[in-house]
Amino acid sequence: MQHEAVFILAIESSCDDTAAAVLQNDKVLSNVVANQLIHNQYGGVVPELASRAHQQNIVPVIDAALKVANINKEQLSAIAFTQGPGLMGSLLVGSSFAKSMALALNIPLIAVNHMQAHVLAHFIDEEGFDKPSFPFIALTISGGHTQIIKVNSFFDMEIIGETTDDAVGEAFDKSAKILGLPYPGGPLVDKYAQLGNPKAFTFTKPKVPGLDFSFSGLKTAILYFIQKKTFENPNFIEENLNDICASIQHTIIEILMDKLQLAVATTGIKQIAIGGGVSANSGIRKTLKEAEQKFGWKTYIPKFEYTTDNAAMIGIVGYQKFLLGKFETSDVVSKARIQF
Ligand code: KG4
Ligand code: ZN
């Protein structure tokens, strides 16, 4: 079936960002995100505050997405929303809104898996960005997830490795917290790391079999290291911040790269696509680009606004599901945990 133009309104509310986007087929017409700054003072996302903020933000965010796209709601072909995984209270705000709107407009409702969306964000049509071809390996690294996925086709994905405890983003954020940096500390660690020596300090890498990850041991190692050093010199952090950040980041990147190399060796697939908020990290981007030369890989890094939590990625999955007629009725339920 050929469609002239499909307009999808996509809604994402799985964690602490309220987001809405409008896509025309695989092109993004608008991509609006309202970040919830309220959580910063608590050092992490507070679920109850997140769902309340979603309730306040959802109408203005959707309104803005439609206005920026210059589309009125009667032109919409379908509404896509994040079904999970995520915080239940947050998911419910987006799903209830999507259901009501689809019902009112009498158009199809499409449920999207947030983790699948991080992977399929690579298929948004964007000038200057290549799309991977199947099969490829996706590395999804965010504050909530760390997964290596073998992607056989749009909806045939296999998780071949994942974290057994903290996510990579948490490893960054918790390390930053130990250094007294504000939440979320990942981008700050990245910033200081660029000015430091990655070999200044050594942290032991965890030994986890296969393609799985573990980051909680690293966090403890960093904590003990900082406690010991600041006992000897109370100004240790201030005097060495850049080097500490560079060394932490270097260790995290090595952990990721070791597993990616193993994933390539076991699958024979040399196309690597990364996604999730941590893929914004400059060190990870640089190392992946170097791996193209070093190992003959082809790497894909989406446009920044499609790597962190956003609704455009929900929209691209919505578009693919629209073409396949994968629609839901309004009794579809949100799921805090969900596999592919
Ligand atoms: O995908 P995302 O926006 O939200 C979810 O967790 O789903 O990812 C947020 C995570 C946070 O842990 C944040 O510290 C981390 O991504 N992050 C970074 C960088 N930018 C964001 N970590 C390291 N370096 C960065 N440049
Ligand atoms: Zn995410």
Image (cartoon, rainbow, N blue to C red):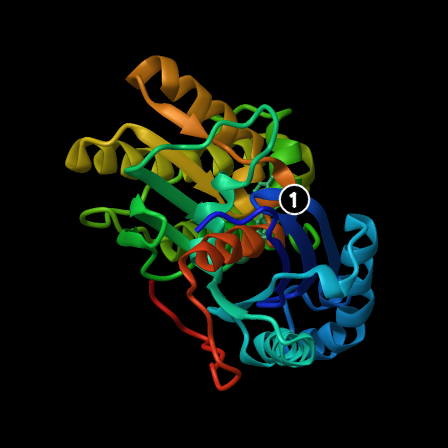
Amino acid type, mark 1: Val
**Residue that label 1 marks:** 28
Q: Looking at the image, which residue is at 45% across and 30% down? A: 300
Label 1: few (<14), some (14–19) or many (≥20) C-alpha neighbours in 10 Å: many
Ligand 2 within 8 A of label 1's CB?
Answer: no
336 displayed left or right of 102: left
Q: In the image, is residue 123 above or below residue 329?
A: above
339 displayed left or right of 102: left
Q: Looking at the image, which residue is at 45% across and 58% down? A: 321
* Residue 219 rendering spot, x and y as whole percentages: 45, 53
Which quarter of the rendering shows the C terminus?
A: bottom left
* Residue 65 rendering spot, x and y as whole percentages: 76, 56
- In the rendered image, is residue 1 in sight? yes
Q: Secondary structure at mark 1?
A: strand
**Figure quadrant of residue 289:** top left
222 displayed left or right of 232: left
- In the rendered image, is residue 241 in sight? no
Q: Looking at the image, which residue is at 48% across and 64% down? A: 112
Q: In the image, is residue 135 above or below residue 54?
A: above
Q: How many marks?
A: 1
Can you name the residue that lies furthest to the left here?
Answer: 266
* Residue 223 rendering spot, x and y as whole percentages: 49, 53
117 displayed left or right of 210: right
Relative to the observer, which residue lies in front, 75 or 255?
75
Relative to the observer, which residue lies in front, 205 or 20?
20
Q: Looking at the image, which residue is at 59% across and 52% down? A: 6
Q: In the image, is residue 28 above or below residue 38?
A: above
* Residue 86 rendering spot, x and y as whole percentages: 51, 70
Relative to the observer, which residue lies in front, 76 or 339?
76
**Figure quadrant of residue 166:** bottom left
Relative to the observer, which residue lies in front, 27 or 18?
27
Can you name the residue that lies furthest to the top here?
Answer: 293
